[in-house]
C-alpha cells in the first residue's frame, strides 16, 4: 500500500497535505502526529518499531520515547470519535505499534473548503521549532474544546513561537482562517480593536463602534485569532475578547501574555522554561534536553560545522542550566558563539545582561537583549510590586510564603500586602510557585534573580536584606536541635532540606568582612544535623570550624556548647579531632547544668573514645550518659545510646552484647521515625554476622541494607559507600573476587568523595592479594597501616582478621626486606591513588 490518500473509517488521511479530515473538516492533529499515523497506515497490518516512527517524526533529532507516546495518545484521541477507533492502534510492548483499523485507498479531492482554510496571515517561521512537544500537543487539544486559551509565561520563554507553531499545525480546522495580531509595538489600549480589525480586513465605520463591527464580521465565521503580547494592554484586550466570545459562536482566541487576561472562560496555559540537562549528563541524555536541542540547533546556524562532541557536553549543560532553559537567553548566547567559545560564554554569565545581547535587528527592541526583555516586565509593575520583587532576590533558592512576608515587608508594605503582591508576581510569571507539596514554595529563575538583585543594589538595600535574611534563617533553625530529637525523618526532610541553600548564603554573609557573626555562630550549630542528614559532613565541618573561629567572650555558652558538639559529630569519622570537641562541649554543658545536652554529648564522646581504643573511658562516658537519661527523654536519645554502646561492644569483641544493643537501637530508631540511623543499625547487625563468620548471613544482610538505601531518599554517599565496601570484604572472604570488585567500583568512589575511603582499603588489599596482584596488595597494605596510625584508628575485630589474613599471604610471597619496601612505597600514596590502585583489576 502506498501513495494515498486513505479512507480510515469516517476519516480521510492525506499525507501530502499533512491532514486528517472527517466529513471534509480537518481534525486538530499536528504534522508529527499525521506523519506517525501515515507510516502506521501504510505499513498496516505490519508492525512498525518505535525507532522507525521516531525517525520519521523527528528526523535528525534525538528525543525520548515519551514524545512518541504523546503523539500516539493524540492520534487515539481523534480516532476515538469513530466506534472502536481508540483501539485501531495496537501497542506491542517494548517493540512498537501496529495499525489494525479499516484502511482503503481513495482518490484525492480538492474542495473549496480547503482553499477557504488556507486563509491566514501567519508569518512564515524563520527558524526551526525545537522541543515543546507536550506543550504543542496540549495546546492543540485545548483548541478543540476551549474558546479562549492564554499562554502565560515570563518574557523570552517562547510563548509566541509556541502559539504560531500550534496555529500553523491546525490551520485546516478553521474555515474562516487563522489570523495573527501582534500588539507588541503599541502601548495604547484604545488601539487594540484597530489592530485586530486591520489583521482581519474589517473597515472602521462611522455608524458603529469598531468592536461591534468586529463582532458582526466574525459572527458566522469559524476563526482562530492569535493575539500576541497582551500583558501591557489588558485594559484593551480583555473587553474586546470578552465581547467577541459573547457575540460569536465559532471564534477561538489563542492569546499570549505575561499575566492572565481574567476574562470569563479563560483557560490558562502556564509555559515553563525548556527542560535542562543534569550537570553531569552524558551526550545521549544531553540530547534529550529541550534546552540543549535548541542551543545546539542555534549554534549550528552560527557555526555550520559545529558538532556536539563528548568533550563539549559539560559546557553545553552548564550553559543551559545557567540561563534556566529560557529560549531567548539560549538564542542570544548562541549568537555570541561566533566570537566566544561555550566555555568563555559560561565564564561571563555573571555579567549575563551585558553578554546576552545582539538579537535579530528586525526584532522589537525588548527582544534584542535579555535585559530589555526583563525591563519590559519590570516597567509594567506597580511600585510595591517592584519593591517586593527586588527584595525576593535575597533568596538563593525556593522560599516559603512566611519567608517572603518576613523579608519583603516594611513599614509601608505589611505582610498582608506582600501576600497580595506575591500572588500578582506569580500571575505575571515573574515568580514561580510550586504547590505540589503540602505548603507552596516560590522561587525566581536565576536570570530573574540576577536582574532583581541588580535592582536591589540600585536601591541600596542589598546589605540590609542580607542581614535580615541571615537573622531570619538563624531564627528558623533555632528549633532544629529539638526537632531532630523528636520528629521523624520524613517530617525533618520536609521542613529543613529545602532550606539548605539559605543556610549556605546566610553563613557566607555572617562570616564575611561586612557580615555579623553572632547569628552565624548560632546557625552553624543548629544546622549541624542537616549537614549530617544530607551526607555533607566535610562542608558542615568546614562551616562549623569557621564559626568556632569567631567565638568570643560575648558568645552565649549554649551556642558554643552546641557548636562544639555539632563540629565533633561532623568529624566523628576522625576520632582524634572529634574527641576533644566533645570534651569541650561536655564541659560547657556541665556548666550550664543541662542534663539532656550533656547526655547527648557524652554518648558521642563514648563513641570517639572507643574508636581511639580507650575502651574503659568510653564505657565510663556511656554509663554517665545513661544515668542522665530519663524515661521522658525522646526515644531517639535512648536509641543513639544503645547504637554507640553496640559499637563499643563490637570493638571489644563482645558480639552477643553488641547484637542485643543494636536490636534495641534499631527498634527505638523505628519508633522515633529515624529511618536513616535504623538502616545504619541494620548495617551493624550485618557486621556482627560477618565478625562471627556467618558470611552467607552477612552478605544477605548487607544486600538488604543496600536495597533499602537505593529505594529511599535517606541514603547518603557515606552510608551507601560503607555498605558496598563492607560487601566487598564479605565477598572477598567468600572468594567471589569479581563480584567484590564490581561492588567496590561503585562504592569506593563514594567514600573517596566523602573522605572515608582509607578505612576500607584493607579489604581491597586482601582482594588484590587473592587475585594474585601481590605487589599492589602490599602497597595497599602499607597505605592502610599508615592511614590507621595517622588517624589513631582502633581497628574492628573484622579488620584485624583481614589484616592477619593479608599479612599471611604477603609474607609467604615476599622476603621481609622486599615486603617492607613495598609497605613504605604504599605509605606514600594519597587516598585517591590508593583507591585507583584498589580498583585496578
Image (cartoon, rainbow, N blue to C red):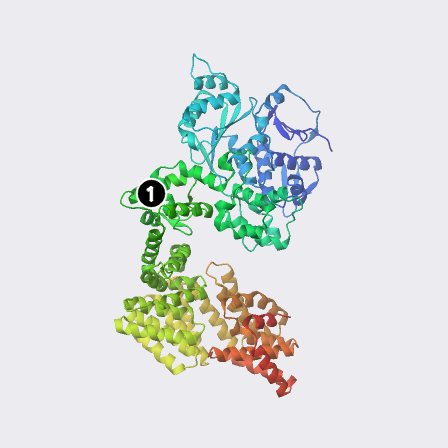
The vertical placement of 516 against 732, above or below, is: above
Q: Is residue 356 left or right of residue 439?
A: right
Mark 1 nearby-residue class (10 Å; few <14, some 14–19, many ≥20): some
For this orientation, the residue located farthest to the bottom is 816
**What number of labels is visible?**
1
Q: Secondary structure at mark 1?
A: helix
Instruction: Depth check: give the residue in front, 437 or 594.
Output: 594
The vertical placement of 421 against 747, above or below, is: above
Give the residue pinned by disc 1. Answer: 419
**Image location (x, y in percent) of residue 623:** 34, 78
**Image location (x, y in percent) of residue 490:** 41, 57
> Residue at 63% across / 19% down in the picture?
112
Q: Quadrant of the C terminus?
A: bottom right
Instruction: Depth check: give the residue in front, 810 or 315.
Output: 315
**Image location (x, y in percent) of residue 407:** 33, 49
Can residue 808 be seen here? The reply is no
Q: Is residue 444 left or right of residue 710?
A: left
Q: Quadrant of the N terminus?
A: top right
Can residue 250 be seen here? The reply is yes
Q: Quadrant of residue 5?
A: top right
Instruction: Depth check: give the residue in front, 503 or 140.
Output: 503
Q: Is residue 821 left or right of residue 258?
A: right
Instruction: Depth check: give the residue in front, 364 or 134.
Output: 364
**Image location (x, y in percent) of residue 477:** 34, 59
Amino acid at each position: 500500500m502506498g501513495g494515498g490518500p486513505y479512507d480510515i473509517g469516517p476519516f480521510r488521511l492525506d499525507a501530502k497535505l499533512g491532514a486528517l479530515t472527517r466529513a471534509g473538516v480537518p481534525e486538530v492533529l499536528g504534522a508529527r502526529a499525521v506523519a506517525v499515523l501515515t507510516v502506521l497506515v501504510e505499513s498496516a497490518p505490519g508492525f512498525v518499531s518505535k525507532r522507525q516512527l521516531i525517525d520519521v517524526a523527528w528526523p535528525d533529532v534525538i528525543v525520548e520515547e515519551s514524545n512518541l507516546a504523546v503523539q500516539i495518545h493524540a492520534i487515539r484521541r481523534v480516532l476515538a470519535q469513530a466506534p472502536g477507533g481508540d483501539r485501531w492502534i495496537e501497542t506491542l510492548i517494548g517493540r512498537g505499534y501496529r495499525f489494525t483499523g479499516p484502511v482503503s485507498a481513495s482518490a484525492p479531492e480538492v474542495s473549496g473548503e480547503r482553499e477557504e482554510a488556507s486563509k491566514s496571515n501567519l508569518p512564515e517561521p524563520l527558524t526551526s521549532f525545537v522541543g515543546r512537544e507536550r506543550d504543542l500537543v496540549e495546546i492543540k487539544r485545548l483548541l478543540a474544546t476551549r474558546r479562549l486559551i492564554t499562554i502565560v509565561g515570563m518574557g523570552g520563554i517562547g510563548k509566541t513561537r509556541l502559539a504560531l507553531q500550534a496555529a500553523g499545525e491546525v490551520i485546516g480546522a478553521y474555515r474562516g482562517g487563522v489570523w495573527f495580531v501582534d500588539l507588541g509595538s503599541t502601548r495604547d489600549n484604545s488601539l487594540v480593536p484597530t489592530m485586530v480589525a486591520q489583521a482581519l480586513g474589517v473597515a472602521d465605520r462611522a455608524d458603529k463602534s469598531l468592536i461591534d463591527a468586529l463582532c458582526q464580521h466574525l459572527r458566522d465565521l469559524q476563526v482562530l485569532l492569535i493575539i500576541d503580547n497582551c500583558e501591557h494592554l489588558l485594559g484593551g484586550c480583555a473587553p474586546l475578547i470578552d465581547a467577541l466570545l459573547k457575540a460569536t459562536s465559532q471564534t477561538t482566541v489563542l492569546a499570549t501574555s505575561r499575566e492572565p487576561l481574567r476574562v470569563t472562560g479563560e483557560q490558562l496555559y502556564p509555559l515553563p522554561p525548556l527542560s535542562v540537562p543534569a550537570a553531569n549528563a552524558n551526550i545521549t541524555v544531553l540530547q534529550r534536553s529541550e534546552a540543549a536541542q535548541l542551543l545546539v540547533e542555534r549554534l549550528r546556524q552560527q557555526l555550520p560545522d559545529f558538532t556536539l562532541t563528548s568533550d563539549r557536553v559539560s559546557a553545553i549543560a552548564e550553559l543551559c542550566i545557567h540561563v534556566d532553559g529560557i529560549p531567548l537567553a539560549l538564542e542570544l548566547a548562541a549568537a555570541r558563539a561566533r566570537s566566544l567559545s561555550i566555555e568563555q560564554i559560561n565564564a561571563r554569565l555573571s555579567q549575563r545582561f551585558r553578554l546576552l545581547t545582539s538579537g535579530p535587528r528586525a526584532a522589537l527592541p525588548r527582544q534584542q537583549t535579555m535585559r530589555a526583555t526583563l525591563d519590559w516586565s519590570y516597567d509594567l509593575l506597580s511600585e510595591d510590586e517592584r519593591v517586593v520583587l527586588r527584595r525576593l532576590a535575597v533568596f538563593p533558592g525556593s522560599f516559603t510564603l512566611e519567608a517572603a512576608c518576613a523579608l519583603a515587608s516594611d513599614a509601608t508594605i505589611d505582610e498582608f500586602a506582600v501576600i497580595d503582591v506575591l500572588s500578582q508576581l506569580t500571575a505575571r510569571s515573574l515568580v514561580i510557585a510550586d504547590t505540589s507539596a503540602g505548603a507552596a514554595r516560590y522561587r525566581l529563575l536565576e536570570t530573574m534573580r540576577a536582574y532583581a538583585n541588580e535592582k536591589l543594589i540600585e536601591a541600596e538595600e542589598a546589605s540590609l536584606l542580607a542581614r535580615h535574611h541571615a537573622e531570619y534563617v538563624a531564627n528558623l533553625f533555632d528549633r532544629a536541635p529539638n526537632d531532630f530529637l523528636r520528629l521523624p525523618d520524613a517530617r525533618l526532610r520536609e521542613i529543613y532540606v529545602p532550606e539548605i541553600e539559605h543556610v549556605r548564603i546566610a553563613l557566607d554573609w555572617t562570616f564575611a568582612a561586612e557580615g555579623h557573626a553572632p547569628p552565624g555562630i548560632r546557625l552553624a550549630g543548629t544546622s549541624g544535623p542537616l549537614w549530617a542528614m544530607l551526607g555533607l559532613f566535610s562542608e558542615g565541618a568546614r562551616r562549623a570550624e569557621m564559626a568556632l573561629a569567631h567565638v568570643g567572650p560575648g558568645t552565649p555558652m549554649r551556642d558554643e556548647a552546641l557548636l562544639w558538639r555539632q563540629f565533633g559529630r561532623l568529624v566523628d569519622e576522625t576520632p582524634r579531632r572529634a574527641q576533644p570537641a566533645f570534651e569541650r562541649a561536655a564541659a560547657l554543658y556541665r556548666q550550664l547544668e543541662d542534663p539532656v545536652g550533656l547526655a547527648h554529648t557524652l554518648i558521642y564522646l563514648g563513641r570517639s573514645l572507643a574508636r581511639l581504643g580507650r575502651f574503659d573511658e568510653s564505657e565510663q562516658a556511656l554509663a554517665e550518659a545513661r544515668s542522665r537519661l530519663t524515661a521522658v527523654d525522646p526515644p531517639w536519645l535512648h536509641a543513639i545510646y544503645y547504637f554507640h554502646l553496640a559499637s563499643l561492644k563490637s570493638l571489644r569483641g563482645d558480639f552477643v552484647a553488641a547484637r542485643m544493643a543494636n536490636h534495641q537501637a534499631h527498634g527505638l530508631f523505628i519508633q522515633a521515625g529515624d529511618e536513616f540511623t535504623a538502616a545504619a543499625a541494620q548495617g551493624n547487625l550485618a557486621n556482627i554476622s560477618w565478625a562471627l563468620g556467618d558470611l552467607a548471613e552477612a552478605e544477605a544482610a548487607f544486600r538488604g541494607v543496600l536495597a533499602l538505601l537505593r529505594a529511599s531518599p535517606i541514603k547518603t554517599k557515606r552510608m551507601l559507600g560503607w555498605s558496598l565496601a563492607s560487601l566487598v570484604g564479605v565477598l572477598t572472604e567468600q572468594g567471589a573476587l569479581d563480584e567484590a570488585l564490581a561492588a567496590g567500583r561503585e562504592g569506593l568512589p563514594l567514600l573517596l568523595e566523602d573522605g572515608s575511603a582509607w578505612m576500607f582499603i584493607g579489604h581491597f588489599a586482601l582482594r588484590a592479594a587473592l587475585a594474585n596482584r601481590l605487589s599492589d596488595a602490599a602497597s595497599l597494605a602499607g597505605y592502610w597501616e599508615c592511614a590507621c596510625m595517622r588517624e589513631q584508628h582502633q581497628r574492628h575485630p573484622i579488620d584485624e582478621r583481614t589484616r592477619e589474613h593479608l599479612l599471611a599471604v604477603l609474607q609467604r610471597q615476599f622476603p621481609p626486606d622486599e615486603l617492607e619496601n613495598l609497605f613504605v612505597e604504599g605509605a606514600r600514596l594519597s587516598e585517591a591513588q590508593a583507591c585507583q590502585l584498589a580498583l585496578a583489576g
